[in-house]
Amino acid sequence: MASTLARVPGRAATGTPLRPEIDAARFLLTVEHSQLVGAYVDPAKGKVTVRAYGLAWLERMRPTWRAATFALVEGSLRRHVFPVLGDRPLAALRRSDVGAWAMALPLAPSTVVTVRQHVGQLLSAAVDDGLLARNPATGARMPRLDPTKARPVTPDTLAALALAAPAWFAVCVPLGASLGLRQGEVTGLTVDRIDFLRRVVRVDRQLVTPSSGPPALEAPKTASSFRTIPLPDFVGQALAAHLAEHGAGVDGLIVHQPDGSALSRNRFGDVWRRLRVGNVRYHDLRHTFASTLLSNGVSIKAVADWLGHASATVTLNTYAHLMPVDEDRARSVLETAFAAREDSLRTGSHPMLKHSASDLG
């Protein structure tokens, strides 16, 4: 028996109305609504490929970025994005595409996240330029990142590092472990940023090594990296002894190569690796600074400020496992606070217990 729907005029066998004028009207309404809310994208614009737009975006951003930042983003796109997504039209890119691409990258999870951030910036710019209605990288699937655990260095290992280092380089150990400076902040520290009288160190510059050309002093990337750090006496003495023996380098640099020139990032890494003391990274000295302060009761807010973190939450997430366990301290505080009232609590004479059964009922 033939389908009833097949015999009804104006309907297909599936029951779908054959009303193209209604579909066209709905499409026009959708376009008008998108225009009103600012989400309409001309289909012709969305045909631009990821590679074509990415290259134009890089050139547009080049003057606004540091050379090192441009090299990092350009390298990420050229090596990891354009070979896979480069020929895709922007409008054809979906969140699932970005997630599948990210999960297939043969990189460490932390590196994948960094490359994904670069893609997100590119696609966000495409949204701003009216080529996309929304950023398909937002919410895309990413590899799981295991929580990073700080690795503080023992005092014996710090001493071994200082002994193994060349004389002109040894001061880097206390600068990292006792001031919490990053490598670029150590190599960018100049004499005029040390206040021996007030015993503080001002951090407002770092040494940046571009992909081409000599290292240069530049301001930190973030506002939170501008900070003033307490200068322990023994570090002040180490700095004074270092300057007396080796002098200041070009631009007043405290840490410099024997000829006075700036110590590039690559050269710093070469010297550090040759120390061959355990499996210690230079960044572990910064962890040591933070963990030493926190384990001895210094406030998380103060440590976050001295590390140059944007918020205490960042510091807490990284170093909470190194803070002292508070159970014994809590017991001691509570016992001290309430021990004097113990007898009255036991006998029922304390105000907290002066309630009859009827009062409580």
Image (cartoon, rainbow, N blue to C red):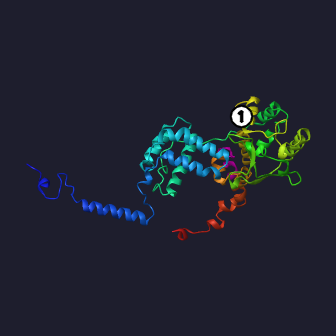
- Magenta stretch encompasses residue 328: yes
On screen, residue 286 above or below 19? above
How many discs appear?
Answer: 1
Callout 1: SS: loop
- Residue at the outermost bottom position: 359
Q: What predominant SS class does the magenta segment belong to?
A: helix
Residue at 72% x, 48% y is 294
Q: Is residue 262 left or right of residue 112?
A: right
Magenta-drawn stretch contains 314: no
Q: Relative to 67, is 253 on the left or the right?
A: right
The answer to whether residue 181 is above or below residue 12 is above
The crowd level at tag 1 (other Cα within 10 Å; few <14, some 14-19, many 20+) is some
Q: Position of residue 278 (x, y in %)?
A: 72, 30
**Residue at the spot x=13%, y=57% of the render?**
8
Where is residue 215 shown, x and y percent of the image? 75, 42
Residue lying at the far left of the rendered structure: 1
Magenta part of the protein: which range?
A: 321-330
Q: Nearer the viewer, residue 215 or 49?
A: 49
Residue 181 seen by the camera: no
Question: Percent position (x, y) of residue 281?
Answer: 70, 36
Q: Nearer the viewer, residue 117 or 57?
A: 57
Q: Quadrant of residue 267?
A: top right
Label 1 amino acid?
Answer: Val
Q: Quadrant of residue 176?
A: top right
Asked whether residue 60 appears in the rendered view, the answer is yes
